[in-house]
């Protein structure tokens, strides 16, 4: 496969046959906006005004995105006429997405530099954004004065109305992003990771005026490019709002991540491969109508960055690359790894496989070097903070801690992390891996809902289909077409073969290098969406069937929040307000007015299993399951009375124990067994005082005398 053969299908068969007369295409935007608003009204019900008011936090998002776009246009100016960009159906729109992605990556690394120099306070973050905007302004002005808008002015065709179902998942994505972190998506532990580090770490970095790793939170050693965007967002808001930035941090970050996911969808739809408008619409719908895309996109995760950079990287890997665009491909792969470490095997390795399949060995070397340069700031940071007398430091800590160095970790914690982030052992056999693949993809309703998922979501008392439900009822409907789609797509030319290779490499990487969770398989959606688009173009009748199932899946998106929050033309389920002041407004202090009780603002808290420190204004101590548990160490070393004295020595006023979360983490990651009801009961007999608070769903609060 030395060169791309000429595509067998014409690029725009339907487009070129249209009469130049008729309504312009941009008019499709009116029903799209109206449909999104109606869908939001259906989903939100009486809470629609609160949802719309929360969406005004998009203004904060633009504070980050606009400078990134301007800077990115300057970065892509040297490659604007490259064949890889011109291969897109709308090159200028594709360049806008590419520029925004590169600009966001540059601002992320700039924020890391500011944090390393302790310049997060004051006007330095705003100065960074202003410098990015000023540096990119000349190139942006030149771009917009010459931008080709003819695709928007071309005649409106019937097939473009297939875009209308996309209103439903977009409405769900934006509505869910208006819920505070920690209140949605039970399949993700109600966003536990968001509270534990995706938003907690930017908050702590800002308070400390430093991006140095945080003691007690092992995730702070990982690459955090998307979290750097959340950090600079909060830093700019701090100059205006001073210390009351949680509202902007939570909702601004979630809406920013939702926008990044939508940009990833545009990158898929505008990919520089030969595909007509009908196929691109199918690819976009496959991406947006997948419930996992919406669940992940509405949380302040970093997976959106993986999808955005991955979609752009795979698109360029399919195109004819000159040397400047080869360098851009390397930058995109480096930025994807800067967002999430698993991109190394789910984005970088598949892209490398596609280049090798085309015998582009020299270009692969350039891509690898450029990616390493982009990863080097995080690599250097990790090595500096894991350097010991016996090790120069681990560049990918906490990965490979057993061989490259474990820094401050003892061997048992390194083993616990490795055990919690690896697939089943090899001696489990192929059957165990096959069962995991089926359960986490084909039978997972957040990849594609089956009949049981539709029935459960639409029931008067919505719930979730059980794992005991017969598998034919749990089988995702869209998966029924996967085999014919893949078979027919391979007739369309080399691009489909390369995408199939990409998907196979991703499958192998997911099975061998991850803990086999469905969310980590989400990058599969990138080659799958394009393969669906190619097959739908190749066989229009199959394309009609695919679009019909995708419309059904879009309708399911309307119901996603029913079992989660009791929404859909009705009031919010009361059980979903456990201890957060209001769903669409964040409290000044997490614990104020809890059952009418008042806690002092100057109190110092110790949290076990609980990750609500993000919402607390007071001082607090906590640790993740993979760090040394300080209270457990005190219990093991000095007994219950010594543990109480340890709390007193550290001036702890209150202890919060989230037992359901402790049990969940113990089952999944091996939470320290010394934190148990028996030992806490002994501490109570040694002087720890229970606080009589009810209806906390298994959470206990204790006062330290």
Image: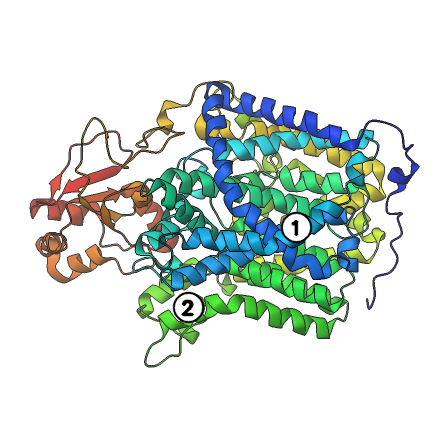
Decide if residue 72 is in sight here: yes
**Measuring 52% from the left and 60% from the top, which residue is drawn there?**
338
Residue 331, compared with residue 254, is above or below; it is below
Helix or strand or loop: what does disc 1 sit on?
A: helix
**Toward which corner of the image does residue 346 lie, by quadrant?**
bottom right
Residue lying at the far bottom in this picture: please name it. 390
* Closer-to-camera residue (381/65): 65
Of callouts 2 and 1, which one flags the residue occurring earlier in the amino acid sequence? Answer: 1
Q: Is residue 79 left or right of residue 650?
A: right
**Toward which corner of the image does residue 442 lie, by quadrant?**
top right
Q: Is residue 118 left or right of residue 74?
A: left
Task: Classify mark 2: residues with Cα within 10 Å, few (<14), some (14-19) or many (20+).
Answer: many
Residue 500: % across, % down: 73, 56
Question: What is the distance, in whole Å, between disc 2 and disc 1 at their CAs?
Answer: 36 Å
Residue 55, compared with residue 305, is above or below; it is above
Residue 102: % across, % down: 60, 56
**Toward which corner of the image does residue 139 lie, by quadrant?**
bottom right
Disc marking residue 207: none
Helix or strand or loop: what does disc 2 sit on?
A: helix
**Measuring 20% from the left and 26% from the top, which residue is drawn there?**
596
* Closer-to-camera residue (598/461): 598
Decide if residue 451 is in sight here: no
Residue 250: % across, % down: 41, 40
Please name the colour scheme applied to the rendered image. rainbow
Residue tagged 1:
140
Residue tagged 2:
382
Residue 348: % across, % down: 61, 63
């Amino acid at each position: 496969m030395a060169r791309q053969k000429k595509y067998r299908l014409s690029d725009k068969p339907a487009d070129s046959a249209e009469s130049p007369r008729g309504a312009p295409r941009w008019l499709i935007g009116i029903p799209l906006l109206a449909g999104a608003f109606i869908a939001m009204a259906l989903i939100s019900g009486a809470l629609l005004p609160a949802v719309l008011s929360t969406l005004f936090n998009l203004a904060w998002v633009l504070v980050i995105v606009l400078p990134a776009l301007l800077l990115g246009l300057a970065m892509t100016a040297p490659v604007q006429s490259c064949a890889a960009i011109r291969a897109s159906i709308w090159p200028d729109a594709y360049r806008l997405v590419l520029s925004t992605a590169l600009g966001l990556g540059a601002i992320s690394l700039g924020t890391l530099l500011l944090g390393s120099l302790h310049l997060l306070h004051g006007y330095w973050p705003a100065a960074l954004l202003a410098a990015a905007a000023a540096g990119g302004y000349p190139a942006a002005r030149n771009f917009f004065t010459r931008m080709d808008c003819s695709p928007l002015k071309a005649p409106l065709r019937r097939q473009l109305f297939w875009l209308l179902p996309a209103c439903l998942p977009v409405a769900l994505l934006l509505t869910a992003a208006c819920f505070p972190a920690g209140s949605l998506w039970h399949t993700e532990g109600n966003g536990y990771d968001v509270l534990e580090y995706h938003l907690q770490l930017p908050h702590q970095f800002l308070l400390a005026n430093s991006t140095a790793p945080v003691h007690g939170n092992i995730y702070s050693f990982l690459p955090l490019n998307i979290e750097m965007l959340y950090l600079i967002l909060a830093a700019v808001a701090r100059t205006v709002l001073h210390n009351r930035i949680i509202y902007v941090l939570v909702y601004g970050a979630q809406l920013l991540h939702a926008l990044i996911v939508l940009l990833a969808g545009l990158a898929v739809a505008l990919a520089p491969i030969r595909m007509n408008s009908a196929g691109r619409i199918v690819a976009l719908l496959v991406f947006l109508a997948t419930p996992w895309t919406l669940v992940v996109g509405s949380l302040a995760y970093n997976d959106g960055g993986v999808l955005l950079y991955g979609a752009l990287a795979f698109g360029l890997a399919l195109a004819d690359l000159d040397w400047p665009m080869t360098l851009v491909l390397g930058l995109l792969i480096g930025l994807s790894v800067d967002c999430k470490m698993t991109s190394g095997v789910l984005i970088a390795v598949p892209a490398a496989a596609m280049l090798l399949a085309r015998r582009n060995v020299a270009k692969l070397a350039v891509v690898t070097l450029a990616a390493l340069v982009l990863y080097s700031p995080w690599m250097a940071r990790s090595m500096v903070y894991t350097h010991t007398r016996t090790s120069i430091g681990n560049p990918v800590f906490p990965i490979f801690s057993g061989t490259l160095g474990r820094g401050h970790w003892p061997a048992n914690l390194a083993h616990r992390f490795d055990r919690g982030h690896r697939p089943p052992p090899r001696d489990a056999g192929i059957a165990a891996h096959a069962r995991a693949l089926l359960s986490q993809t084909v039978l997972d309703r957040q990849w594609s809902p089956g009949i049981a998922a539709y029935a459960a979501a639409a029931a008067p008392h919505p719930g979730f289909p059980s794992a005991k439900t017969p598998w034919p009822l749990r089988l995702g409907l869209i998966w029924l077409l996967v085999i014919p789609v893949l078979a027919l797509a391979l007739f369309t030319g080399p691009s489909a073969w390369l995408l199939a290779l990409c998907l196979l490499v991703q499958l192998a990487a997911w099975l061998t290098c991850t803990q086999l969770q469905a969310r980590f398989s989400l990058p599969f959606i990138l080659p799958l969406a394009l393969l669906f688009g190619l097959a739908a173009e190749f066989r229009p009748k199959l394309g009609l069937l695919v679009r019909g199932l995708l419309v059904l899946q879009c309708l399911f998106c309307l119901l996603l929040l029913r079992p989660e929050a009791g929404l859909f033309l009705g009031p919010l389920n009361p059980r979903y307000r456990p201890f957060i002041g209001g769903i669409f407004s964040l409290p000044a202090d997490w614990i104020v007015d809890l059952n009418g009780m008042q806690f002092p603002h100057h109190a110092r808290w110790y949290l076990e299993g609980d990750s609500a420190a993000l919402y607390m204004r007071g001082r607090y101590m906590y640790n993740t399951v993979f760090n040394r548990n300080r209270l457990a160490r005190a219990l093991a070393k000095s007994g219950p009375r010594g543990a109480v004295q340890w709390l007193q020595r550290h001036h702890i006023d209150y202890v919060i124990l989230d037992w359901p979360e402790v049990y969940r983490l113990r089952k999944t990651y091996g939470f320290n067994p010394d934190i148990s009801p028996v030992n806490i009961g002994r501490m109570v007999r040694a002087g720890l005082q229970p606080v009589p608070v009810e209806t906390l769903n298994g959470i206990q609060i204790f006062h330290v005398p």
